[in-house]
Amino acid sequence: MAQTLLIIPSFPAPLFQSNDSKRVTTETKPSMSIRRDPLDLLKKEHEEGQKHLERLGSAADSIKINGFSVEAFEEIVDAVRWMNTDVRRHTDWEEKHLFPLIERHTSELPEQMRNDHRELRSSFTQLLDIVREIEEGKMRGSSIHEIVQISYVIVELMRSHIQKENDHLFPLAQKMLTIKEYDELMHQVVASRS
């Protein structure tokens, strides 16, 4: 399966020409395309993630209903690759760049998101271990049940997490971050994805 690369042009000029202490609001923030708003870029990654989660859930359904198949297992392996690259990069970026900016203003919601990330990493590690065992021919009697169950857990955790970020964290960031902080966020997105 080919990976989709998101190509983002660099924007050397500040996104907003305004006093750095002002908050980013609909009055001060110009209309931005998806390629210019850092939070829209993260939402776009969430949309792509939902597609991967749909395939992971479908593969787990297939195994649960029809038993183990190479095709369904390959879908799960593809999901593991996606989680190990794109999801890891996405969550690491949020924890390094987005959360600290929001925590300048409040700490509760970013800490909840970090907890979600820890729970997702733990579930991912479990799935990765099961996939490795199966690939190495070490399938146990419980392997099929475990791969289905942990796939369902990951799908549910990630969907809930994505919804919390889209519906609560990102609007909070838009409300709380100063124009300077928002501009800093955009430059970090551009730098990390180029």
Image (spheres, grey):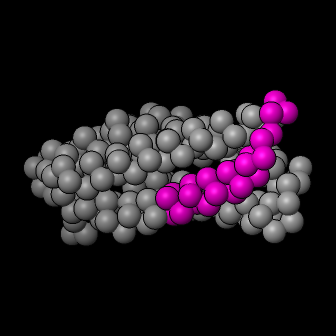
> Between residues 34 and 154, which one lies in front from this camera angle?
154
Residue 57 appears left or right of 7: right
Q: Residue at x 65, y 38 (%)?
A: 128
Residue most toward the right?
A: 70
Q: Is residue 116 magenta?
A: no
Magenta region, main secondary structure: helix
Q: Residue at x 47, y 54 (%)?
A: 41
Residue 77, x across and y down, in percent: 75, 44
Q: Residue at x 49, y 58 (%)?
A: 157
Q: Is residue 123 visible?
A: yes
Residue 30, x across and y down, in percent: 31, 63
Disc tally is 0
Residue 1, x across and y down, in percent: 80, 46
Residue most toward the front?
A: 141
Residues shaded magenta: 136-159
Q: Is residue 33 visible?
A: no
Picture quadrant where residue 129 is located: top right
Is residue 189 placed above or below 39 in the rendered structure? above
Is residue 13 placed above or below 35 in the rendered structure? above
Residue 178 appears left or right of 67: left
Picture quadrant where residue 93 is located: top left
Q: Residue at x 49, y 47 (%)?
A: 120
Residue most toward the top?
A: 136
> Between residues 135 and 171, which one lies in front from this camera angle?
135
